[in-house]
Image (cartoon, rainbow, N blue to C red):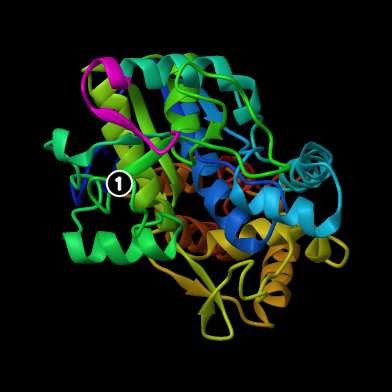
Amino acid sequence: MTLRIYDTARQDVVAFEAGPVVTMYVCGITPYDATHLGHASTFLLYDVFQRRLRDLGHDTRCVRNITDVDDPLLAKARQLGVHYLDLAAGEVARFQADMAALELLPCWSEPRATSAIADIRGFIAMVLERGHAYQAAGAVYFDVSTFAGFGEVSHYGEDKMLALAKDRGGHVDDPAKRHPLDFVLWQPSAEGEPTWETMWGPGRPGWHIECSALALRELGTTIDLHGGGVDLIFPHHECERAQSEAATGSPFARHWLHAPFVYKDGEKMSKSLGNLVFVDQLRERWDPRAIRLAVLEHHYRHHWSWDDGLMARAAARLDRWLGAAGRGGNERTLDDVRHFLDDDLDTPLAVEAIDAAIDGGRRIDEAAALLGVRLD
C-alpha cells in the first residue's frame, strides 16, 4: 500500500508524494509555559510519520520553529517581571526535555523567530514589491484581496474566518486595515517590547511571517509537508500559504497535515482555560513510553478526551509489551503495523496489531520500535 494521509487542503485521504528527501515544517511552541498533552499529541504524530518515511527509505528533514517573540510570550514575561528571552530559554529547555523523554526523533533544525529578523525583513520586502502588501499606521499588512487563493487551505467561508481571526488575535477591527482579514506582517512595538529597525519603521514581526521566512530559509521555496495542530489551520497556516506564495510565486506546501484537539473536562486543553495535563508532571509518575502509548491509541483525525484512567491503561499495555519483548518470530507483526500506518497513519489499529501479535506468540520488537516504543 502507498502511504496515504488526510490532506487538509485537498480535504481527502491522498497518496503522500515526495522524493528521496522529505522536507517538513511543523509549527512549534511559543515558550511561555510547560508542554501539555496537546503539544505531545501533535508532535508525536509527525514523529511516527517520520519513522515510517525513514522505514520506507526516505531521508526526512523536519524543521520545528520556536516562536520566541510573540504577544503571549511578551505578556507572560511582563506579568512575571522577567526578560522575554529568559522566560523563553527556560520553557524551551523544559519542552526539549519532555520531547527527549518521549523519544521523539531530533529535528533537522529548530530555529527561533528571533534568528530570522533579517530574513523576515527581506521576505516582507518581496511581498511589498509584488504588490501584495501595504503600509499603514507604522505597520505592514498583507492585502488578502490580491491573493485569489486565500481560503484554499481551510475552505472556511468569510464569516467563519472573521470569527476565528477575532478569537485568535487577528485584530479584525483594526482601523488601519483595508479589509478585516488583512493580517500584520510587521507592527510597531509597544513600550517595553523588543524592537528592530526596518525601512518601513521600527517594530517587530507579526505572528505568521516567521514561519514563512524560516521555511524558505531552512527548506527552500516549496516543502513537501506543512503541519501543526488543527487550531493553526486558520488563521496561521492560511496566512502563511498566502504570503509565501505571494512572495515567491511558487507553491508553498505540497501537503498539509494537522493534529487533533485534546479535551479535558469537556473543553479543549488550552492555557487560557487552565485545563491542562502537563507532560513533565506525567513523567514524574509514569514511564514516558506509556505516555506515548496513551497518545497513540487515538487516531489523529479525531479529537479525543483525557480521562483519569488513560495512563493506567497505557502503563498496563506497556508492561505487557515489555513482557513479550524478545519472544516469537517472523515479520508478520511489522508488516501489519506498516500496513496500518500507510492507511492514514492509523496508530490505534497499529497498537492493536501488536496486542494481537502478543496473543498469537509473535515477535513485536521491531513493530513497537516503528511506533517509537523501545522495548530493550
Q: Nearer the viewer, residue 18 or 206?
A: 206
Residue in the image at 70% along x and 72% along y: 311
Q: Residue furthest left?
A: 148
Q: Residue furthest front?
A: 137
Q: Quadrant of the C terminus?
A: top right
Q: Secondary structure at mark 1?
A: loop
Percent across and percent down for residue 79 are 79, 59
Q: Which residue is mark 1?
A: 177
Q: Quadrant of the N terminus?
A: top left
Instruction: Tell me the amino acid under the disc marked 1.
Output: Lys
Percent across and percent down for residue 235 are 36, 51
Q: Residue furthest bottom?
A: 265
Q: Nearer the viewer, residue 227 or 313?
A: 227
Is 12 rendered above or below residue 277?
above
Percent across and percent down for residue 137 are 41, 38
Residue in the image at 35% along x and 43% along y: 183
Q: Is residue 326 visible?
A: no
Residue in the image at 19% along x and 42% along y: 150
What is the span of residues highlighted in magenta in the rendered image?
Answer: 127-138
Residue in the image at 21% along x and 22% along y: 131
